[in-house]
Image (tube, rainbow, N blue to C red):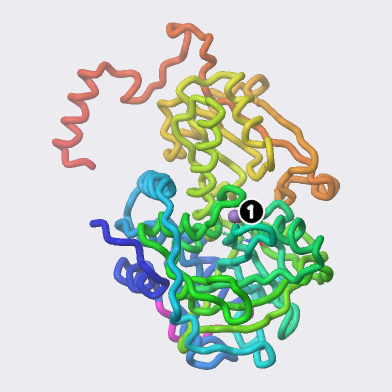
Amino acid sequence: MTTRAPKDFREFLAAIRTSGDLLEVHDEVDWDQELPGLGRLSCERNGPAFLFDKIKDYSPGWRLVTNPIANWRRMAVAFGLPADSHIKRLYETYAAREAKPIPPVVVKDGPCKEVVIPADKADLFDLPVPMVHDGDGGRYVGTWDLVVSKDAKSNWVNWGMYRFMIHNEKLMTGFPRPTSHLGKMLLEGYVPQAKPMPIAIAMGCDPLSHLAAAATFRLGGNEADLAGGLRERAVELVKCETSDLLVPASAEVVIEAEVYPDRVNQEGPYGEYPGYRSGEMGNAICARVTAITQRRDPIWTLDTTGFMDSSATSTSITGAIAIQRRLEANNIPVKAVYVPPEGGIHLAIVSVQRGGAEVAQKIVNVLTVRRALISKVIVVDADVDVFNMPAVLHALATKCHPANGIHVVRYQGKANTLTPAYTQAERQTRSGASVALDSTWPPEWPADETPVRATLDSMYSPDVQKRVLARWNGLGLA
Ligand SMILES: Cc1cc2nc3c(=O)[nH]c(=O)nc-3n(C[C@H](O)[C@H](O)[C@H](O)COP(=O)(O)O)c2cc1C
Ligand SMILES: [Mn+2]
C-alpha cells in the first residue's frame, strides 16, 4: 500500500505509531544523557523511535522524539511507502521525486506561531535540549533541524542541517563547515559587509523537509523546492517574526537568530556522525536569539548522533544518488551506487557495466574533485547487487587484487576533517586520501580465463536454474 508522504511531523508520528515503529515512554527520563542514551541504543539495535512525554526539569507540555528517520522502516513511512519496503525502492523513489521539484507556497499563519516569545523573554534553557553524549562541549540544539538562511546578493534561500550548541540563554555557537552553503553565504556575503546574517532554526517539520535540508544539493538550489518534490506537494511557509526568512508553517519550534559577522565563540567537541568524538573545543560561528516561536504543546526532536544515526540513513540515500549522478555526468558506466549506513558515510559501493583499473581510478578521481566526503569506494561488476552486502564482501575479498587493485588519490585542502583515521596534522591541513578498491574482473581477461562464480545464478545452466527454482518454490521456501 502506498499513501501520501506525511504533510507534517504529527502525521508522520501517527503513521509510525500505526506501523509499530514508535514507542511512547511515559516514565520520567533525564535530558542529561539518559534520554539520548536510549535513542543511541535504539540506533545500534535497529529499534523504534521514542516519544518521551515526561522530561526531567521540564513542564509536562513538552515532548521529545528521537531519531525520526534513522532506520529504513521509518524512512519508508516518511516517503508514504510501506514500512517494509526494500532500500532499493527508497532509493528509486528519492531519485524519481528529486527530478520533479515543487516550489513552496507562502501562507499567512501556521501552528509554529501559536506561542511567540520575543528576544527579551527568550531563554534557550527553556527548551528541553538534551546533553547527547558524555564529553560533548554542551547541549546541542539542532541535531535534527532545518536551518534557513538567505544569500546576501541573490534570491537563493538555503536549507541545511547544522548543529548548534547552547552557549548561554541567548547565544548559540554552530559548526557549519566552511564548504557548507550556510558557511559560504556567511563568509562570502555577510562577513565582507559586516552585516549580521539572519537565520531560522526550525525543529519538528515533516521528515522529508529535514531530509532535503540534510541532502547534498547544488549551490544556489533551494532545498524547499526539493522538499516539495520529495513530498509530492508544496511545503507551506510562513514569515519569521524578526526577519524576512520563511519557515515551514507546521514546525514544532522555530528559533530565530542572527549570526554575528565579527564574533566567534567556543563550540564542540561532539560525538560525530562517523561514530566517534574526534575534535576539540574550538572557535565557531556565534548566533544571538531574536525570537522563539512554537506550538502550544511542542515536540522537540533529537538525533543521537553516532553509529547508525539519522545522517547514516539520510546521507545513504541523498549521497548515493548524488554520487550516481556525478559518475553518469563523467561518462563512467555506472549501474548502481549504495552508501551503506554501517560505513558512517565513509564508504560507497559502485557497480559498473565495465570495470578494470582505469575505471576504478577515474571513479575515485571524479568523487574527490571538489571535496572529499567519502574516503573508500568498492567498485564491483554489474552482476553484484550493491545492496547485497554479503555479495559485495565476497567480491571484495576474492576479486580485489591485494596490490594492483588499490587505486589511491591524495589531496590537500579539501579532505573531510572528520575522517577518524586522519592524523591531527592531516586534519589541520585538510589533507587526506581516498581509495577505490577495484573488485571487478580486468576487462582485458579473456572470458575463458575469467573465474566463474560458484553460485546458482552463474555456474548452472539456465534450464537447471529454472528447475531448481521451481522445486524450491514447491518446497514452500521463500
Ligand atoms: C543530523 C545531522 C547533523 C549534521 N550536522 C552538520 C553540521 O553541524 N555541520 C555541517 O556542516 N554539516 C552537518 N550535517 C551535514 C549537512 O546537513 C549536509 O552536508 C547538508 O548537505 C548541508 O546543506 P548544504 O549543502 O545546503 O550546505 C549534518 C547532517 C545530519 C543528518
Ligand atoms: Mn544547500
Q: How many marks?
A: 1
Question: Residue reaching furthest left?
Answer: 474
Observer-nearest of 388 and 435: 435
Please identify the quarter of the rendering in which residue 160 is found.
bottom right
Please identify the quarter of the rendering in which residue 156 is found.
bottom right
Check the image and report above or below for 115 versus 468. below
* Left or right side of 76 for 379: right
Which residue is depicted at the point 40% across and 49% down?
Answer: 100
Q: Amino acid at mark 1?
A: Pro
Observer-nearest of 178 and 82: 178
Which residue is depicted at the point 76% across and 67% down?
Answer: 285
Ligand 1 near label 1 (Cβ, under 8 Å)? no
Where residue 114 appears, x then y in whole percent? 47, 87
Q: Secondary structure at mark 1?
A: loop
Crowding near the residue tagged with mark 1, few <14, some 14–19, many ≥20 C-alpha atoms within 10 Å: many
* Left or right side of 174 for 224: left
Where residue 183 appears, x then y in whole percent? 71, 58
Where residue 328 appears, x then y in whole percent? 51, 31
Which residue is depicted at the point 84% across and 50% down?
Answer: 428
What is the magenta range?
Answer: 24-32
Which residue is depicted at the point 60% across and 73% down?
Answer: 244
Q: Which image quadrant: the N terminus?
A: bottom left
Ligand 1 falls in quadrant: bottom right
Q: Is residue 27 visible?
A: no
Check the image and report above or below for 460 versus 104. above
Residue at numbered disc 1:
274
Q: Would residue 202 be counted in the magenta stretch?
A: no
Q: Which image quadrant: the C terminus?
A: top left
Check the image and report above or below for 333 versus 422. above
Q: Is residue 406 visible?
A: yes
Q: Magenta-highlighted stretch: main secondary structure?
A: loop
* Left or right side of 397 for 133: right
